[in-house]
Protein backbone atom coordinates (compact mmCIF):
# COMPACT_ATOMS: atom_id res chain seq x y z
CA UNK A 1 0.00 0.00 0.00
CA UNK A 2 1.39 3.39 -1.00
CA UNK A 3 0.63 6.59 0.94
CA UNK A 4 1.35 10.21 0.19
CA UNK A 5 2.72 12.36 3.01
CA UNK A 6 4.28 15.80 3.02
CA UNK A 7 5.30 18.61 5.32
CA UNK A 8 3.29 21.65 6.33
CA UNK A 9 0.67 23.01 3.93
CA UNK A 10 -0.10 26.70 4.50
CA UNK A 11 -2.95 27.97 2.35
CA UNK A 12 -3.56 31.23 4.20
CA UNK A 13 -2.25 34.76 4.00
CA UNK A 14 -0.55 35.39 0.62
CA UNK A 15 -1.76 32.16 -0.98
CA UNK A 16 -5.34 32.79 0.11
CA UNK A 17 -5.15 36.13 -1.72
CA UNK A 18 -4.63 34.49 -5.13
CA UNK A 19 -7.45 31.97 -4.72
CA UNK A 20 -10.92 32.42 -6.14
CA UNK A 21 -12.37 33.81 -2.89
CA UNK A 22 -9.71 35.73 -0.93
CA UNK A 23 -10.28 36.56 2.73
CA UNK A 24 -10.09 40.06 4.17
CA UNK A 25 -6.34 40.73 3.80
CA UNK A 26 -5.98 42.52 7.15
CA UNK A 27 -3.21 40.99 9.29
CA UNK A 28 -2.23 41.46 12.93
CA UNK A 29 1.53 41.14 12.53
CA UNK A 30 4.18 43.55 13.73
CA UNK A 31 5.57 44.43 10.29
CA UNK A 32 3.10 43.29 7.64
CA UNK A 33 -0.49 44.48 8.00
CA UNK A 34 -1.93 43.29 4.69
CA UNK A 35 -1.69 39.74 3.29
CA UNK A 36 -1.17 41.19 -0.16
CA UNK A 37 2.22 42.36 1.07
CA UNK A 38 3.40 38.73 1.00
CA UNK A 39 2.10 38.43 -2.54
CA UNK A 40 4.11 41.52 -3.48
CA UNK A 41 7.27 40.04 -1.95
CA UNK A 42 6.79 36.83 -3.90
CA UNK A 43 6.24 38.68 -7.17
CA UNK A 44 9.35 40.75 -6.55
CA UNK A 45 11.29 37.49 -6.27
CA UNK A 46 9.60 35.39 -8.97
CA UNK A 47 7.62 37.65 -11.29
CA UNK A 48 3.86 38.03 -11.79
CA UNK A 49 1.56 35.56 -10.02
CA UNK A 50 -2.00 35.12 -11.36
CA UNK A 51 -5.08 35.96 -9.29
CA UNK A 52 -8.37 34.09 -9.00
CA UNK A 53 -6.50 30.92 -9.87
CA UNK A 54 -8.10 27.55 -10.55
CA UNK A 55 -8.52 25.29 -7.53
CA UNK A 56 -5.64 23.04 -8.59
CA UNK A 57 -3.15 25.83 -9.43
CA UNK A 58 -1.11 25.72 -6.22
CA UNK A 59 -0.45 21.97 -6.50
CA UNK A 60 1.33 22.22 -9.85
CA UNK A 61 3.78 19.35 -10.33
CA UNK A 62 2.25 17.41 -7.43
CA UNK A 63 -0.81 16.65 -9.58
CA UNK A 64 1.27 14.73 -12.11
CA UNK A 65 3.06 12.82 -9.36
CA UNK A 66 -0.22 11.79 -7.74
CA UNK A 67 -1.59 10.62 -11.08
CA UNK A 68 1.53 8.60 -11.80
CA UNK A 69 1.98 7.04 -8.35
CA UNK A 70 -1.70 6.66 -7.39
CA UNK A 71 -1.27 6.60 -3.60
CA UNK A 72 -4.09 4.87 -1.75
CA UNK A 73 -4.42 7.85 0.63
CA UNK A 74 -3.17 11.45 0.66
CA UNK A 75 -2.41 12.91 4.09
CA UNK A 76 -1.22 16.44 4.87
CA UNK A 77 -0.55 18.62 7.91
CA UNK A 78 -2.82 21.61 7.28
CA UNK A 79 -1.37 24.69 9.00
CA UNK A 80 -4.25 27.01 8.19
CA UNK A 81 -7.57 27.78 9.79
CA UNK A 82 -10.48 27.65 7.34
CA UNK A 83 -12.81 30.34 8.59
CA UNK A 84 -14.49 33.69 8.09
CA UNK A 85 -14.25 34.43 11.80
CA UNK A 86 -12.68 37.86 12.31
CA UNK A 87 -11.12 37.79 15.77
CA UNK A 88 -7.52 36.60 15.56
CA UNK A 89 -5.76 34.86 18.42
CA UNK A 90 -3.19 37.39 19.73
CA UNK A 91 -0.07 35.46 18.74
CA UNK A 92 1.46 37.62 16.00
CA UNK A 93 1.06 35.40 12.92
CA UNK A 94 -2.36 34.15 11.86
CA UNK A 95 -3.18 31.96 8.87
CA UNK A 96 -6.66 31.51 7.47
CA UNK A 97 -8.27 30.50 4.20
CA UNK A 98 -11.77 31.47 3.12
CA UNK A 99 -14.08 28.43 3.49
CA UNK A 100 -15.24 29.08 -0.08
CA UNK A 101 -11.76 27.96 -1.18
CA UNK A 102 -11.99 24.47 0.31
CA UNK A 103 -12.16 23.12 -3.24
CA UNK A 104 -8.39 23.64 -3.31
CA UNK A 105 -8.07 20.65 -0.99
CA UNK A 106 -10.66 18.70 -2.98
CA UNK A 107 -8.71 19.38 -6.19
CA UNK A 108 -5.71 17.65 -4.61
CA UNK A 109 -7.77 14.67 -3.53
CA UNK A 110 -6.70 15.11 0.08
CA UNK A 111 -8.11 12.34 2.28
CA UNK A 112 -6.99 13.55 5.70
CA UNK A 113 -5.87 16.81 7.26
CA UNK A 114 -3.79 16.57 10.41
CA UNK A 115 -4.68 19.61 12.51
CA UNK A 116 -2.56 19.32 15.66
CA UNK A 117 -0.26 22.25 14.93
CA UNK A 118 0.45 25.86 15.89
CA UNK A 119 -1.85 27.57 13.35
CA UNK A 120 -5.17 25.73 13.39
CA UNK A 121 -6.52 27.95 16.21
CA UNK A 122 -5.10 31.18 14.80
CA UNK A 123 -8.67 32.50 14.69
CA UNK A 124 -9.73 31.13 18.04
CA UNK A 125 -12.05 28.35 19.10
CA UNK A 126 -14.74 29.67 16.75
CA UNK A 127 -12.28 29.50 13.87
CA UNK A 128 -11.43 25.92 14.80
CA UNK A 129 -15.10 24.98 14.95
CA UNK A 130 -15.67 26.33 11.45
CA UNK A 131 -12.51 24.63 10.17
CA UNK A 132 -13.76 21.27 11.42
CA UNK A 133 -17.21 21.84 9.96
CA UNK A 134 -15.88 22.87 6.54
CA UNK A 135 -13.55 19.89 6.26
CA UNK A 136 -16.20 17.41 7.36
CA UNK A 137 -18.69 18.89 4.88
CA UNK A 138 -16.06 18.38 2.18
CA UNK A 139 -15.71 14.75 3.34
CA UNK A 140 -12.08 15.26 4.33
CA UNK A 141 -11.12 13.39 7.51
CA UNK A 142 -9.44 15.25 10.38
CA UNK A 143 -7.09 14.22 13.17
CA UNK A 144 -5.52 15.99 16.13
CA UNK A 145 -8.16 18.63 16.85
CA UNK A 146 -11.78 18.54 17.89
CA UNK A 147 -14.65 20.00 19.87
CA UNK A 148 -13.51 18.08 22.97
CA UNK A 149 -10.38 16.24 24.09
CA UNK A 150 -11.87 12.87 23.16
CA UNK A 151 -12.42 14.08 19.60
CA UNK A 152 -8.92 15.57 19.36
CA UNK A 153 -7.37 12.28 20.49
CA UNK A 154 -9.55 10.15 18.23
CA UNK A 155 -8.06 9.02 14.92
CA UNK A 156 -9.14 9.70 11.40
CA UNK A 157 -10.31 6.30 10.22
CA UNK A 158 -9.50 5.80 6.55
CA UNK A 159 -10.67 2.71 4.64
CA UNK A 160 -8.19 0.48 2.86
CA UNK A 161 -8.76 -2.40 0.41
CA UNK A 162 -9.91 -5.77 1.72
CA UNK A 163 -11.66 -4.27 4.75
CA UNK A 164 -8.52 -2.92 6.38
CA UNK A 165 -8.24 0.52 7.96
CA UNK A 166 -5.58 3.19 8.36
CA UNK A 167 -5.84 5.10 11.63
CA UNK A 168 -4.25 8.56 11.65
CA UNK A 169 -3.63 10.09 15.08
CA UNK A 170 -2.15 13.58 15.43
CA UNK A 171 -0.60 15.48 18.35
CA UNK A 172 1.67 18.46 18.93
CA UNK A 173 4.22 19.66 21.48
CA UNK A 174 4.85 23.04 23.07
CA UNK A 175 8.27 23.45 21.43
CA UNK A 176 6.48 23.70 18.07
CA UNK A 177 4.84 26.92 19.24
CA UNK A 178 1.47 25.50 20.30
CA UNK A 179 0.03 27.70 23.09
CA UNK A 180 -0.98 25.96 26.29
CA UNK A 181 -4.49 27.38 25.96
CA UNK A 182 -4.92 25.45 22.72
CA UNK A 183 -4.85 22.09 24.49
CA UNK A 184 -8.21 20.38 24.16
CA UNK A 185 -9.97 19.59 27.42
CA UNK A 186 -12.86 17.37 28.41
CA UNK A 187 -15.31 20.26 27.93
CA UNK A 188 -13.40 22.53 25.54
CA UNK A 189 -12.15 22.20 21.99
CA UNK A 190 -8.55 22.40 20.88
CA UNK A 191 -5.67 20.21 19.78
CA UNK A 192 -4.08 17.11 21.28
CA UNK A 193 -1.11 18.80 22.95
CA UNK A 194 1.42 16.48 24.57
CA UNK A 195 2.86 17.62 27.92
CA UNK A 196 6.32 16.15 27.24
CA UNK A 197 8.16 13.24 25.62
CA UNK A 198 8.28 11.09 28.73
CA UNK A 199 7.58 7.40 29.22
CA UNK A 200 4.32 8.41 30.88
CA UNK A 201 3.25 10.22 27.70
CA UNK A 202 4.14 7.17 25.62
CA UNK A 203 1.98 5.05 27.94
CA UNK A 204 -0.92 7.46 27.56
CA UNK A 205 -0.61 7.40 23.77
CA UNK A 206 -0.49 3.60 23.86
CA UNK A 207 -3.76 3.56 25.80
CA UNK A 208 -5.44 5.92 23.34
CA UNK A 209 -4.28 3.91 20.33
CA UNK A 210 -5.46 0.67 21.91
CA UNK A 211 -8.86 2.24 22.56
CA UNK A 212 -9.49 2.67 18.83
CA UNK A 213 -7.48 0.07 16.95
CA UNK A 214 -8.61 -3.36 15.97
CA UNK A 215 -6.75 -6.30 14.51
CA UNK A 216 -5.35 -5.56 11.07
CA UNK A 217 -5.33 -1.75 11.43
CA UNK A 218 -2.32 0.26 10.33
CA UNK A 219 -1.41 3.29 12.44
CA UNK A 220 0.16 6.60 11.41
CA UNK A 221 1.05 8.99 14.21
CA UNK A 222 1.44 12.62 13.18
CA UNK A 223 3.63 14.74 15.44
CA UNK A 224 4.13 18.50 15.14
CA UNK A 225 7.28 19.01 17.19
CA UNK A 226 10.50 20.96 17.45
CA UNK A 227 11.64 24.31 16.11
CA UNK A 228 11.44 25.73 12.62
CA UNK A 229 15.12 25.68 11.68
CA UNK A 230 18.04 23.33 12.23
CA UNK A 231 18.80 19.71 11.40
CA UNK A 232 19.56 18.33 14.85
CA UNK A 233 17.40 15.48 16.12
CA UNK A 234 17.40 15.64 19.91
CA UNK A 235 18.12 12.41 21.76
CA UNK A 236 14.77 12.74 23.53
CA UNK A 237 12.95 12.99 20.20
CA UNK A 238 14.64 9.92 18.83
CA UNK A 239 13.94 7.93 21.99
CA UNK A 240 10.29 9.03 21.88
CA UNK A 241 9.96 8.01 18.23
CA UNK A 242 11.42 4.59 18.98
CA UNK A 243 9.09 4.13 21.93
CA UNK A 244 6.05 4.99 19.82
CA UNK A 245 7.03 2.19 17.45
CA UNK A 246 8.16 -0.36 20.01
CA UNK A 247 5.64 0.24 22.79
CA UNK A 248 2.64 2.02 21.28
CA UNK A 249 2.60 0.00 18.06
CA UNK A 250 2.86 2.95 15.66
CA UNK A 251 3.67 1.79 12.12
CA UNK A 252 4.77 5.16 10.71
CA UNK A 253 5.68 8.41 12.47
CA UNK A 254 4.89 11.52 10.42
CA UNK A 255 6.90 14.36 11.96
CA UNK A 256 6.78 18.01 10.91
CA UNK A 257 7.24 21.63 12.08
CA UNK A 258 10.66 22.39 10.62
CA UNK A 259 10.55 24.65 7.56
CA UNK A 260 12.99 22.35 5.74
CA UNK A 261 13.27 18.56 5.44
CA UNK A 262 15.17 16.74 8.17
CA UNK A 263 16.43 13.19 8.70
CA UNK A 264 14.47 9.98 8.29
CA UNK A 265 15.07 6.67 9.99
CA UNK A 266 13.86 3.10 9.65
CA UNK A 267 13.46 1.73 13.17
CA UNK A 268 12.74 -1.99 13.47
CA UNK A 269 11.33 -1.88 9.96
CA UNK A 270 9.12 1.18 10.50
CA UNK A 271 9.52 4.60 8.90
CA UNK A 272 10.20 7.62 11.10
CA UNK A 273 10.00 11.01 9.36
CA UNK A 274 11.50 13.45 11.85
CA UNK A 275 10.68 16.59 9.90
CA UNK A 276 9.12 16.75 6.45
CA UNK A 277 9.72 20.47 5.87
CA UNK A 278 7.23 22.88 4.32
CA UNK A 279 5.40 21.60 1.28
CA UNK A 280 3.54 24.82 0.39
CA UNK A 281 3.77 28.28 1.94
CA UNK A 282 3.87 32.00 1.14
CA UNK A 283 7.46 32.61 2.30
CA UNK A 284 8.72 33.40 -1.19
CA UNK A 285 10.80 36.57 -1.17
CA UNK A 286 11.13 36.71 2.63
CA UNK A 287 14.75 37.03 3.72
CA UNK A 288 16.45 35.04 6.47
CA UNK A 289 17.56 31.41 6.92
CA UNK A 290 18.52 31.11 3.25
CA UNK A 291 21.15 28.52 4.19
CA UNK A 292 18.38 25.97 4.81
CA UNK A 293 16.74 26.45 1.36
CA UNK A 294 13.22 26.26 2.81
CA UNK A 295 11.69 26.67 -0.65
CA UNK A 296 12.84 23.14 -1.47
CA UNK A 297 10.67 20.28 -0.28
CA UNK A 298 9.91 16.61 -0.74
CA UNK A 299 6.90 14.51 -1.61
CA UNK A 300 7.03 11.30 0.44
CA UNK A 301 5.54 8.11 -1.01
CA UNK A 302 6.07 5.29 1.51
CA UNK A 303 4.98 1.82 0.50
CA UNK A 304 3.96 -0.25 3.53
CA UNK A 305 3.48 -3.96 3.95
CA UNK A 306 -0.20 -4.27 4.79
CA UNK A 307 0.15 -7.18 7.22
CA UNK A 308 2.60 -5.54 9.63
CA UNK A 309 3.01 -1.95 8.46
CA UNK A 310 6.72 -2.34 7.79
CA UNK A 311 8.35 -0.16 5.17
CA UNK A 312 8.84 -1.77 1.77
CA UNK A 313 10.17 1.30 -0.01
CA UNK A 314 10.15 5.08 0.19
CA UNK A 315 10.06 7.17 -2.97
CA UNK A 316 11.07 10.82 -2.62
CA UNK A 317 10.22 13.56 -5.14
CA UNK A 318 12.10 16.87 -4.73
CA UNK A 319 10.02 20.01 -5.25
CA UNK A 320 10.44 23.79 -5.33
CA UNK A 321 7.81 26.37 -4.33
CA UNK A 322 7.79 29.20 -6.87
CA UNK A 323 4.97 31.62 -7.71
CA UNK A 324 2.99 30.05 -4.82
CA UNK A 325 2.97 26.74 -6.69
CA UNK A 326 4.62 23.32 -6.35
CA UNK A 327 7.14 23.03 -9.17
CA UNK A 328 9.84 20.60 -10.22
CA UNK A 329 13.17 21.17 -8.55
CA UNK A 330 15.89 22.12 -11.03
CA UNK A 331 18.91 19.84 -11.41
CA UNK A 332 20.96 22.28 -9.31
CA UNK A 333 18.31 22.37 -6.60
CA UNK A 334 18.03 18.58 -6.60
CA UNK A 335 21.78 18.29 -6.18
CA UNK A 336 21.82 20.71 -3.25
CA UNK A 337 18.95 18.94 -1.51
CA UNK A 338 20.37 15.50 -2.25
CA UNK A 339 23.68 16.41 -0.64
CA UNK A 340 21.92 17.83 2.43
CA UNK A 341 19.63 14.83 2.84
CA UNK A 342 22.41 12.30 2.32
CA UNK A 343 24.31 14.02 5.10
CA UNK A 344 21.33 13.96 7.48
CA UNK A 345 20.00 10.52 6.49
CA UNK A 346 23.49 9.12 6.93
CA UNK A 347 23.36 10.00 10.61
CA UNK A 348 20.44 7.57 10.88
CA UNK A 349 22.04 4.76 8.91
CA UNK A 350 20.23 5.56 5.66
CA UNK A 351 21.20 6.71 2.19
CA UNK A 352 19.48 7.85 -1.01
CA UNK A 353 19.57 6.20 -4.41
CA UNK A 354 19.05 8.42 -7.45
CA UNK A 355 16.64 7.26 -10.13
CA UNK A 356 16.94 8.12 -13.84
CA UNK A 357 13.77 10.24 -13.70
CA UNK A 358 15.22 12.56 -11.05
CA UNK A 359 13.33 11.03 -8.12
CA UNK A 360 15.02 9.26 -5.23
CA UNK A 361 14.62 6.05 -3.24
CA UNK A 362 15.55 5.52 0.40
CA UNK A 363 18.24 2.92 1.11
CA UNK A 364 18.49 1.44 4.61
Image (spheres, rainbow, N blue to C red):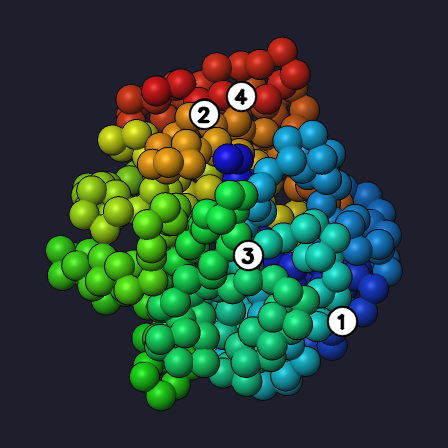
73 left or right, relative to 314: right
Residue depth check, mark 1 versus mark 2: number of the one nearer the observer: 2
Determine which of the numbered discs, if any, sits on residue 313 in the image. Answer: 2
Residue visible at 56% across and 74% down?
132
Could you say where residue 324 lies in the image, as x and y percent from the top left? 72, 48
Q: Secondary structure at mark 2?
A: strand
| Residue 2 or residue 227, whichever sits in front | 2
In the figure, 322 relative to 354: above or below?
A: below
Determine which of the numbered discs, if any, sits on residue 112 in the image. Answer: 3
Could you say where residue 50 lies in the image, as x and y percent from the top left? 86, 52
Q: CA distance from mark 1 to mark 2?
A: 38 Å
Residue receiving disc 4: 360
Mark 1 and mark 4 in contact (Cβ < 8 Å)? no
Among the two numbered marks 2 and 4 on one chain, the one whose residue lies closer to the N terminus: 2
Mark 2 and mark 3 in contact (Cβ < 8 Å)? no
Could you say where residue 14 lies in the image, as x and y percent from the top left? 70, 60
Residue receiving disc 1: 100
Labels in figure, total: 4
Residue depth check, mark 2 versus mark 4: number of the one nearer the observer: 2
Q: Residue furthest top?
A: 356
| Residue 41 or residue 236, whichever sits in front | 236
Among the two numbered marks 1 and 2 on one chain, the one whose residue lies closer to the N terminus: 1
Amino acid sequence: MTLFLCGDVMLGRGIDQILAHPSDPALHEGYVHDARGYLALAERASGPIPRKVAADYVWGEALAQWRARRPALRIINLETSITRYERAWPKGINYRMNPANVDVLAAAGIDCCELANNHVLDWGYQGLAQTLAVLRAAKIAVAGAGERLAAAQAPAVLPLPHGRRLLVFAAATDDAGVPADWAAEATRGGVWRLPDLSAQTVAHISTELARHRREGDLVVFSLHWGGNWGYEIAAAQRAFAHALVDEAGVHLLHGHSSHHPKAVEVHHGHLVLYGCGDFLNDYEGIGGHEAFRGELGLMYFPQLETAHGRLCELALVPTHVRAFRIQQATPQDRRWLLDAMRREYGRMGCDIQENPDGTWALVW
